[in-house]
Amino acid sequence: MNRLNVLGLTLTALFFTSPTLADWAANTADKQQMQAASAIEKMRTAIPRTEQYFEQAYAYAILPSVTRIGFGFGGASGKGFVIAGDNAIGKTRFWQFTSGIQAGAKNFSMIVFFKDKTALEKFKASDIQFMGQAGVAFATVGLAGTPTYSDGVAIVTMTRFGLMGEFTISGAKFSYKALAADAT
């Protein structure tokens, strides 16, 4: 095979594959983006298995600070950014309501990885999702049982602080708002 054919095949492969998740550079003048970048770095360091998701995902949403409170019934809320390639393409908000055996409060960081463009587009549609959760968190040590890739989405959380035990059923909703530079 000659060099021209190899170059053509390489360019074709690059054109038709998902964007590589290059290291996103937060806008240093934006406090929220700097918090998101810090959360990404902490998660990559504390949870080495996330590296494979960063390498394989089409895009991801980073929510650097999600606060959750529960006693029988509970809820959570947080906000962050959606990153594709090396660009922040949108903002996201997360709401969750829970019911079950639970007590406590905690704050955690969350990354939602999108395996492909279809998963990202479904996320942008802001559908409500129902899920089960089980876990315990004490101070900065957290143990959580939440499904990984499901319908093209994987969620990884890292407890920042708090004390909470739970075995719950929950409904969660993400909202998405494109940044001005994102035409989709």
Image (cartoon, rainbow, N blue to C red):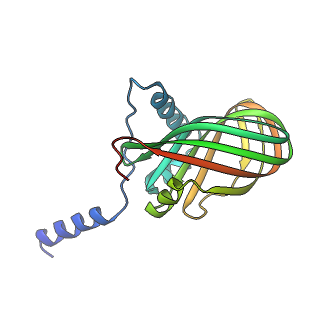
Q: Position of residue 127 (x, y in %)?
A: 60, 57
Q: Is residue 132 left or right of residue 17?
A: right
Q: Is residue 148 left or right of residue 183?
A: right
Q: Position of residue 103 (x, y in %)?
A: 85, 37
Q: Up-down: is 137 above or below 54?
A: above
Q: Determine the residue positioned at 57% across, 37% down.
A: 79
Screen quadrant of the N terminus: bottom left
Nearer to me, 88 or 122: 122
Q: Determine the residue positioned at 45% across, 31% down.
A: 33
> Which residue ends up furthest to the bottom in the rendered image?
1
Q: Position of residue 133 (x, y in %)?
A: 76, 51
Nearer to me, 154 or 90: 90
Q: Determine the residue positioned at 82% across, 45% down.
A: 166
Number of marks present in the image shown: 0
Nearer to me, 26 or 169: 169
Q: Determine the residue positioned at 58% across, 65% down.
A: 151
- Where is residue 66, by image quadrant? top right
Q: Is residue 33 left or right of residue 75?
A: left
Q: Position of residue 109 (x, y in %)?
A: 61, 37
